[in-house]
Amino acid sequence: MSDDIYLEAGRYGRLAVIRLKPNEDLVAGVEQAVAEAGIVCGIVRSAVGSLVDAALGYGEAEEASITTVQGPGIEILTLSGDLRPDPDGVTRAFLQGTVSDSDANVYGGYFVSGGNPICITLELVIQEWIPA
């Protein structure tokens, strides 16, 4: 078995339906919304919306490269991810997906915190995960 596989027992809990408004950052907005809902761990079940611009990262932290997709009107095609507490106990969102620009070019990677302002709105459904 690979060392990269991690299994965790637990169960699903509540659902949070979240709407992020124009110019809120995708990652920070999700983190704030789940904190307000009292969700510490969770997963993204669904999402639909658009961004003004997008910043997508690739690779590990020290060697990461970031691609900026210029808008306005970047459509989110897919969005998935999970929420976990950092070593200080603050819940962080680890979100990845694909986006399309106005010329139908498609880009993918993880959403960089601070680089993905919402355009019109973004609606998400987050499901709480309760580790055993």
Image (spheres, grey):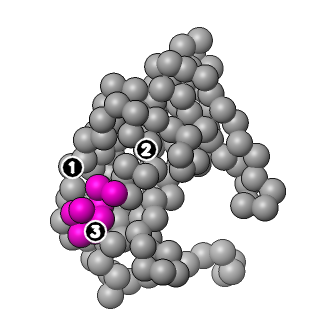
Which type of secondary structure does the marked residue at label 2 adopt? helix
**Of the residues shown, which amino acid type is indicated by label 3?**
Ile
The image shows residue 65, relative to residue 102, as above or below, that is: below
Q: How far apart are marks 1 and 2 (CA)?
A: 14 Å
Depth check: 19 or 107 in front?
19
Count neighbours of disc 2 (C-alpha within 10 A) and say few if under 14, some if 14 to 19, many if 20 or more. many
Q: Is residue 90 left or right of residue 102?
A: left
Any mark on residue 26, and which?
Answer: 2
Q: How far apart are marks 3 and 2 (CA)?
A: 17 Å
Q: What residue type is labelled 1?
A: Val
Residue at screen point 32% across, 87% down: 132
Q: How far apart are marks 1 and 3 (CA)?
A: 12 Å
Question: Label 1, on which residue?
Answer: 17
Query: Which residue carries the number 3 mark?
Result: 39
Give coordinates of residue 77: x percent, y percent: 46, 31
Provide residue 128's location: percent of width, then percent of height. 28, 67
Q: Which mark is residue 70?
A: none
Mark 1 vs mark 2: in front: 2
